[in-house]
């Protein structure tokens, strides 16, 4: 089945196709309204020749001809820019106000691409700032329209080999899906090719050892190996060659440079050894490396693919917030409510919101009373009572009754849009942790290349017929395969072990970065607590005519709560095994409580002023949420019967985890949006000396950034959407297993087991991992430095170099696998805790 692609940008279009544009009398499929608008603008401007004569798809054009420039000029029009360009300054009407465009960049493969794009564009006159996000492929470009046009900036992006177009969520999703499919195809070709070539390689090695394989069979096996390895090199390994060429252009010797030299050099040398005997009378043949080339390509692609999946998860995090918005709403039009798209709302519009619907915009409640679930924005798990005049937040959920809302803020001015902006800003400001191996490899590769040139020049004068093979031996034996695997192999083994323990690491920098963490910050609800309400205390009120038993009072309260869907009701369900009494004529009083008849008596349970209107009872002094149950026979005189304390229970391992972190010398802080007394009681019970209550997402992010500006490294543990900006802004972030989807995709690690002890285990594993990494780096560098002079002296044949390279990599991987062995991570005190034992725990108030 042929895949439908956008006629303008050629990105895949989801079926069924929704958008079409008429080009020369023919409806053409479009992936989004943006491409449709640009296409229609091109046609309206009389530029149809661009589509008629182009020979390549729009996202593959590299020959910047006149037609391409004509297309890019369309993006200078105000009507086209309105969807992706916004003023960067406070005065949006001034001509001198800089503009900021959100662009999606196609062709980004690595951090070197980010460096090239940012430095190239920032050098243009009139461009103030360029920020490109590797995870999302999104670029934020700020420029002065009076000095440089957007079309010129887009043209410069094309000149350095990339494709830029306006950012839109559907286009970004299509781009990421296409990138994922392409990578899977490359990985499949490399994997199948590697397995087949290894089968032939076993036969070649066996024949070389026994020295009895006829030349005709040897040559035939080599030809088949060449045929299979060719698509692996030319297709699967193409990203390495492309990235290496870009590294060379920006004068940065990254890991892709030696990888490309090793793959390309070994492949070309193998082709020469395979076919020179047929075309040259003096062809001397030589060794072939098809198996090494194919396997090396497959292993590297596997690591890159895991990194790609992590980046894609990050890219989807910001878009997940926009999914909280309802697509339509009931808007008042001429005295009647009509369903309209949310995008049509304007300030002062009146909207009707039914129970269960999401609130489409920030506004003021003008009619009706209800409860609103704001957990996705504030982290508060209980519905909040709302009365006329109260503020309602976009994306929160109406729980109880129909209400009417007067819109005050729409679009990017809403609270949820502010959280999205905080997330994007935090992701862009997130500090990058440099890879040790990549730093070492840059200098090492430069030295190896210099040595290889000198070796070839020297042997050309001594034995010209051996110069190429000796030089190839130098390149192969010193190929930093083991060096490139030293860090990733250890990290992969460590993350796999943590996964079995219940801690899923989703970013490669976590274990490397944990060693620098000195501050650990916890959210409260759902993190240190279970996020589930429970009945923690039952306190009967003394009565003149005698007390009922706790069990009887609890039974009556549960009978009433059985008629409620409120989260508090579940606390009674989990406490009472079965109901022995039934309530009748039950009435729910919004925001107050519940009332009903049990036997011949009326009962109420809820807020104290509702259950006992006379107010002649004192609330218990203990912290927590207290509900009062009262009884009456005439609906006038209500007698208090029992107090019920509702709490969010702490995780059983929380206190021990905090103690272990203190022994490691970590500063532990509790940041919560809950009220001060509740947060203080939680901190005291867990031994946390430093805490802040009633913290908004902005407050939490500011607290994190203040610590970072003082040189501290911060780990944040949270679970709610309100924690997303802080999770993205922290040096390392961790989400609980029961966290929201957005929190999990934004975090660097997910505690899927829900056991906080695994956090302390991760710190302990960091010590072992760093030790393994140092051992791997020492071995790989030592091997290369020892083998280099032997290869340069002609004492190591190419096949010996290939074998040594494989053995070196095998030793590195085997050493890293030691991290998979069960250690003493879950016992206390562990090795790393003993290292910190002499330190005074930090975090005093």
Image (cartoon, rainbow, N blue to C red):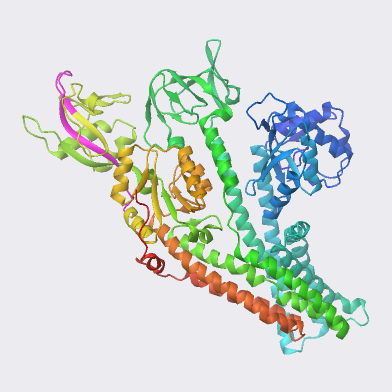
Residue 48 located left or right of residue 167:
right
* Residue at 70% over, 52% down: 115
Q: Residue furthest right?
A: 281
Q: Which residues are magenta?
A: 630-652
Residue 831 x %, y %: 40, 69
Residue 791: name its quadrant: bottom right
* Residue at 75% over, 37% down: 126
Residue 383: name its quadrant: top left
**Which of these two is toward me, 109 or 726?**
726
Residue 320 located left or right of residue 602:
right
* Residue at 68% over, 60% down: 188
User: In this picture, is 620 found above or below 369?
Assistant: below
User: In this picture, is 98 found above or below 521?
Assistant: above
Q: Residue furthest front?
A: 710
Q: Residue furthest left?
A: 545
641 within the magenta span: yes
664 within the magenta span: no
Residue 825 at least partly seen:
no
User: In this picture, is 265 found above or below 378?
Assistant: below
Residue 424 x %, y %: 58, 41
């Amino acid at each position: 089945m042929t895949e439908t692609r956008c006629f303008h940008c050629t990105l895949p279009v989801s079926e069924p196709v929704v958008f079409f544009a008429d080009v020369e009398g023919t409806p053409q499929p479009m992936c989004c309204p943006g491409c449709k608008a640009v296409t229609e603008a091109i046609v309206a401007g009389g530029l149809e020749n661009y589509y008629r004569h182009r020979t390549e798809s729009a996202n593959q054009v590299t020959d910047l001809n006149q037609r391409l420039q004509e297309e890019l000029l369309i993006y200078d029009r105000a009507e086209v820019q309105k969807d992706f360009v916004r003023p960067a300054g406070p005065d949006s009407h001034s001509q001198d106000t800089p503009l900021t465009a959100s662009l999606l960049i196609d062709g980004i493969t690595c951090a070197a691409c980010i460096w090239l794009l940012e430095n190239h564009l920032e050098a243009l006159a009139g461009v103030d700032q360029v920020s490109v996000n590797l995870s999302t492929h999104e670029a934020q470009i700020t420029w002065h329209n009076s000095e440089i046009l957007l079309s010129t900036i887009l043209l410069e992006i094309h000149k350095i080999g990339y494709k830029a177009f306006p950012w839109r969520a559907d286009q970004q999703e299509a781009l990421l899906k296409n990138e994922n499919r392409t990578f899977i195809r490359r990985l499949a070709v490399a994997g199948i090719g590697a397995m087949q070539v290894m089968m032939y390689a076993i036969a070649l090695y066996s024949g070389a050892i026994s020295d009895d394989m006829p030349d005709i069979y040897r040559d035939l096996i080599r030809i088949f190996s060449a045929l299979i390895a060719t698509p692996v090199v030319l297709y699967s390994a193409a990203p390495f060659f492309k990235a290496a060429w870009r590294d060379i252009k920006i004068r940065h010797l990254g890991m892709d440079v030696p990888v490309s030299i090793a793959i390309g050099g070994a492949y070309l040398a193998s082709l020469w050894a395979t076919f020179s005997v047929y075309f040259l009378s003096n062809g001397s043949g030589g060794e072939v490396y098809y198996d090494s080339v194919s396997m090396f390509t497959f292993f590297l692609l596997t690591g890159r693919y895991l990194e790609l999946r992590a980046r894609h998860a990050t890219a989807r995090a910001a878009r997940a917030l926009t999914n909280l918005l309802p697509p339509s709403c009931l808007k008042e039009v001429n005295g009647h409510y009509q369903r309209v798209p949310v995008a049509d709302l304007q300030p002062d519009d009146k909207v009707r919101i039914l129970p269960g619907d999401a609130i489409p915009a920030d506004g003021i409640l003008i009619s009706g009373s209800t409860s609103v679930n704001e957990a996705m924005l504030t982290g508060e798990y209980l519905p909040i009572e709302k009365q006329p005049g109260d503020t309602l937040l976009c994306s929160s959920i109406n729980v109880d009754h129909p209400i009417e809302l007067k819109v005050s803020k729409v679009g990017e001015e809403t609270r949820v849009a502010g959280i999205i902006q905080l997330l994007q800003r935090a992701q862009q400001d997130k500090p990058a942790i440099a890879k040790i191996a990549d730093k070492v490899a840059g200098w090492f590769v430069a030295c190896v290349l210099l040595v290889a040139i000198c070796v070839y020049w020297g042997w050309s004068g001594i034995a010209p017929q051996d110069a190429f093979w000796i030089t190839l031996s130098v390149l192969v034996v010193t190929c930093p395969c083991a060096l490139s695997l030293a860090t990733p192999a250890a990290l992969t083994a460590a993350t796999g072990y943590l996964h079995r323990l219940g801690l899923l690491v989703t970013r490669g920098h976590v274990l490397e970065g944990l060693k620098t963490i000195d501050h650990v910050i916890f959210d409260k609800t759902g993190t240190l607590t279970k996020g589930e309400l429970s009945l923690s205390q039952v306190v009967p009120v003394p009565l003149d005519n005698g007390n009922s038993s706790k069990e009887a009072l609890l039974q009556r309260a549960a009978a009433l709560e059985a008629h409620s869907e409120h989260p508090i009701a579940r606390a009674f369900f989990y406490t009472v095994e079965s109901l022995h009494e039934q309530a009748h004529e039950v009435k729910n009083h919004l925001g107050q409580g519940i009332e009903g008849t049990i036997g011949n008596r009326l009962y109420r349970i809820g807020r104290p002023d509702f259950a006992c209107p006379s107010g002649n009872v004192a609330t218990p002094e203990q912290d927590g949420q207290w509900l009062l149950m009262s009884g009456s026979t005439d609906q006038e005189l209500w007698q208090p019967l029992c107090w019920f304390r509702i709490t969010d229970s702490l995780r059983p391992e929380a206190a021990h985890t905090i103690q272990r972190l203190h022994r490691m010398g970590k500063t532990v802080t509790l940041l919560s949006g809950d009220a001060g007394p509740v947060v203080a009681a939680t901190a005291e019970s867990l031994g946390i000396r430093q805490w802040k209550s009633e913290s908004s997402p902005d407050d939490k992010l500011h607290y994190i950034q203040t610590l970072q500006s003082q040189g501290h490294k911060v780990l944040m543990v949270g679970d709610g959407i309100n924690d997303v900006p802080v999770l993205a802004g922290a040096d390392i972030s961790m989400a609980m297993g029961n966290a929201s989807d957005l929190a999990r995709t934004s975090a660097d690690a997910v505690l899927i087991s829900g056991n906080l002890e695994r956090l302390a285990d991760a710190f302990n594993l960091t010590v072992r991992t760093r030790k393994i990494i140092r051992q791997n780096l020492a071995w790989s560098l030592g091997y290369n430095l020892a083998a280099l002079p032997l290869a340069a002296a002609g004492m190591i044949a190419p096949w010996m170099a290939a074998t040594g390279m494989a053995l070196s990599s095998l030793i590195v991987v085997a050493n890293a696998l030691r991290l998979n062995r069960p250690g003493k991570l879950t016992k206390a005190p562990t090795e790393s805790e003993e290292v910190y034992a002499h330190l005074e725990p930090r975090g005093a108030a």
